[in-house]
């Protein structure tokens, strides 16, 4: 955790305390039902213990439904206190639990402070908005539906606002972009949860036992989100297994796609691309050679230069891969990167002869990562090139075969790269050797 993020997290305690003190000065407008309050607090704590990873940096759970119900059922001061207590209990239970894969606690003390404090601020804002609007409505929750909608919107906006700013400080990215990624992943489920929260408040008012009954649809929404994420992961795993089988057909390319994905992700992060774009690039890079499943073994394993006919067969693999991926909605964007990963900046690539910015940025990233791994791996037609020679070749083709900005980002992100490597001066160092290799290395690197 960076110092700036730590300061921001700890700073959320001040507005939480201030809002709580302010609300204590307001006269209560309804009595607190201890049975209902206790039920909702425990249900919220339980829901917080079953988060679902909906994006690389964002988790969601069913607790927002409980929090909105609390805002609608109780006066502002007890509502804020109950939501804070519920989150504290939920994250406290997560702190006691350990991740079986890493052995680390699922929550740290600073997480408890931030999650509890920012939710108390969000609850206070939502409760005040609801109190101000509902005072002009009828005495029941049905007539206060517009006020409940506003309260839910405020609760969501303040809550997600705190979270995306924290993630932005950690990743040095635009918080609005982070919100767009999170909203694209779970906005419909979040909206459904707030609807369930409103119904929970309507039905359990004066009937605490109905709060338990209403947890059935809330749990169903959570389960649907979990199942959709699980289905997505299983589909991706199946497609990646097919791509790995293609790599396994040739001992020279074993785990090639995995390495290309690692290089591509590192380069994309160096370029500070949004997480969502980085994930699209990773998915495409993992399966970029899937189309080689249709290339005959005698062509794929040939030890020597391919004939024109054989090379024509090899050049079809981007289109074949894109056609296979078209059957999976998870690769709706990634299939274009697979189709274009052998295009060149100068327009001499294949299959469509695209040039410059007409080539998708992700495809340009994969092209550099693919060429690097091809050059630094043993192949039937040559031994692996030394890293400095391979990097010099990338710089030689910078602006001709490969995107200059991508080559620069790749060089800067290369693990263990010396300052000369990062500044691209190895392009000059490697020139004598590259003259002897000539254009053959550039032609073979992309096959």
Image: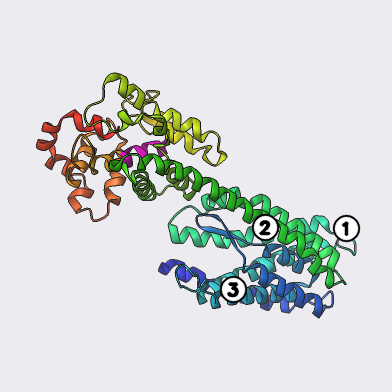
Alpha-carbon span between mark 1 and mark 2: 31 Å
Quick one: 164 or 263, which is closer to the camera?
A: 263
Mark 1 or 2: in front is 2
Label 1 sits on residue: 143
Alpha-carbon span between mark 3 and mark 1: 35 Å
Residue 16 visible in the displayed image = yes
Task: Tell me, yes or no, whether the highlighted magenta stretch contains residue 285.
Answer: no
Label 2 sits on residue: 223
Mark 3 or 1: in front is 3
Quick one: 295 or 442, which is closer to the camera?
A: 295
Are dots 3 and 2 in contact, CB under 8 Å? no
276 vs 266, left or right, is right
- The x and y percentages for residue 55 are 53, 53
Q: Residue 209 lies in what quarter of the image?
A: bottom right
Give the magenta-colored segment's residue range: 360-370
Q: Residue at (85%, 69%) from the top-left corner?
A: 205
Mark 1 lies on a secondary structure that is loop
Residue 153 visible in the displayed image = no
Label 3 sits on residue: 91
- Mark number displayed over residue 270: none
Mark 3 lies on a secondary structure that is helix
- The x and y percentages for residue 40 are 75, 72
10 vs 267, left or right, is right
Task: Tell me, yes or no, whether the highlighted magenta stretch contains residue 367.
Answer: yes
- Quarter holding the C terminus? top left
| Position above or below: 416 against 20 | above
């Amino acid at each position: 955790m960076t110092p700036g993020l730590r300061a921001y997290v700890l700073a959320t305690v001040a507005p939480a305390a201030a809002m709580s003190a302010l609300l204590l000065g307001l006269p209560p407008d309804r009595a607190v039902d201890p049975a209902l309050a206790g039920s909702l607090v425990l249900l919220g704590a339980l829901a917080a213990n079953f988060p679902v990873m909906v994006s690389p940096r964002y988790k969601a759970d069913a607790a927002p439904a409980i929090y909105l119900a609390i805002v609608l059922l109780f006066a502002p001061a007890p509502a804020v206190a109950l939501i804070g207590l519920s989150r504290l209990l939920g994250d406290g239970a997560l702190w006691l639990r350990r991740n079986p894969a890493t052995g680390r606690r699922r929550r740290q003390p600073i997480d408890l402070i931030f999650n509890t404090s920012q939710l108390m601020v969000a609850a206070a804002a939502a409760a005040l908005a609801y109190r101000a609007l509902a005072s002009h409505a009828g005495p029941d929750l049905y007539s206060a539906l517009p006020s409940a909608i506003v309260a839910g919107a405020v609760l969501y906006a303040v809550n997600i606002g705190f979270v995306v700013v924290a993630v932005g400080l950690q990743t040095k990215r635009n918080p609005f972009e982070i919100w767009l990624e999170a909203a694209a992943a779970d906005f419909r489920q979040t909206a459904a949860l707030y609807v369930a929260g409103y119904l929970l408040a309507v039905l359990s008012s004066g009937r605490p036992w109905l709060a338990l009954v209403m947890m059935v649809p809330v749990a169903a929404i959570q389960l649907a989100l979990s199942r959709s994420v699980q289905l997505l992961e299983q589909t991706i795993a199946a497609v990646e297994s097919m791509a790995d089988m293609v790599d396994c057909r040739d001992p020279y390319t074993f785990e090639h796609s995995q390495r290309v994905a690692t290089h591509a992700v590192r380069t994309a992060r160096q370029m500070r691309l949004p997480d969502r774009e980085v994930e699209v690039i990773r998915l495409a890079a993992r399966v970029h050679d899937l189309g080689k499943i249709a290339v005959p073994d005698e062509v794929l394993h040939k030890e020597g230069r391919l004939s024109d006919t054989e090379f024509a067969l090899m050049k079809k693999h981007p289109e074949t891969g894109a056609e296979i991926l078209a059957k999976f909605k998870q690769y709706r964007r990634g299939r274009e990167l697979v189709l274009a990963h052998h295009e060149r900046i100068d327009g001499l690539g294949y299959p469509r002869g695209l040039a410059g910015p007409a080539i998708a940025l992700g495809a340009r990233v994969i092209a550099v990562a693919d060429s690097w791994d091809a050059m630094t791996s043993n192949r039937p037609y040559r031994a692996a090139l030394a890293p400095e020679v391979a990097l010099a070749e990338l710089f030689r083709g910078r602006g001709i075969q490969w995107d200059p900005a991508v080559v620069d980002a790749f060089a800067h992100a290369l693990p263990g790269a010396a300052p000369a490597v990062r500044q691209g001066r190895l392009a000059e160092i490697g020139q004598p050797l590259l003259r002897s290799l000539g254009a053959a290395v550039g032609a073979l690197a992309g096959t």
